[in-house]
Amino acid sequence: METQSYKVAYQGGSDEIVEKKSRFIATIEPIEREEDAVAFINAVRKKYWDAKHHCFAFTIGRNHELTRCSDDGEPSGTAGRPMLDVLLREDIHNVAAVVTRYFGGILLGTGGLVRAYQKSLQAGLAASAVIEKQTGTLLEIKTDYNGLGKIQYLLAQRSIPVQETLYTEKVAIYAVVAAGQKGEVWKAVTEGTNGTAVLSWQDDLEFALLEGQLKIL
């Protein structure tokens, strides 16, 4: 299992900017396959059917295995590629972006177009939810009530999110541990409870924290 975390689009969003009377509307969407990207681009074209340009960029895969971009009638290299450069520079995976332009009658020049498309895309990303996706494993910790506070402290100290805590005669804590922290957490809980806690690894999973809340992906 890979230990590296990576950023993905979790929820899409939209925002717009105005440059010299031209409207640039950026729409962002999470995708998993090229077919998803094509369907999304077509949907944006349909929504803004009266706009002349629908420039797009998307990237798919853990290592950006598939990337595409289009200037859609704008001067070559002024829209699609600069948009893709933003996604790659931000290192966001599995995301598609369309910037729709309503021409305002004033030419921006090639440099102005590049800046406008990139600025619009960044605004769209800011309106979306981008998360850090991590690989990890669910850790079951069984303890008596005397050890509960110590375990909660040790997990919080390492920013280990807890999925669930069950209270019966004893306590069962289900914590999500990133792959790179497994050894450290096991040792800390074992030593911190003088070996009284019973630990067992459960399922491998992918997870993220969104506004402080645990999301199992």
Image: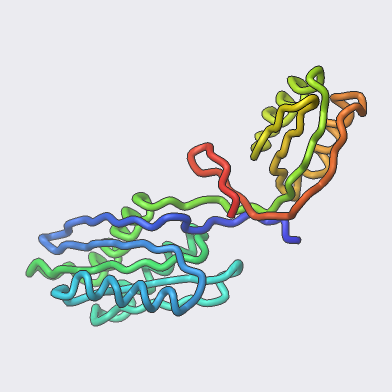
* Picture coordinates of residue 207, whole percent (x, y): 61, 50
Q: Quadrant of the C terminus?
A: bottom right
* Picture coordinates of residue 92, whole percent (x, y): 50, 60
In the rendered view, does 66 fall on the left or right side of 101?
right
The total number of labels drawn is 0
* Picture coordinates of residue 16, whole percent (x, y): 23, 56
Does residue 165 sit above or below 56 in this rendering? above
Residue at (29% x, 64% y) in the render:
117
Does residue 175 sit above or below 36 in this rendering? above
Residue most extreme to the top: 146
Classify residue 100 by image quadrant.
Answer: bottom left
Colour pattern of the rendering: rainbow
Does residue 21 sit above or below 159 in this rendering? below
Does residue 93 sit above or below 71 in this rendering? above
Which is more toward the observer, 115 or 99?
99
Q: Quadrant of the N terminus?
A: bottom right
Residue at (57% x, 70% y) in the render:
61
Residue at (20% x, 68% y) in the render:
101
* Picture coordinates of residue 81, whole percent (x, y): 38, 73
Which is more toward the observer, 217 or 120?
217
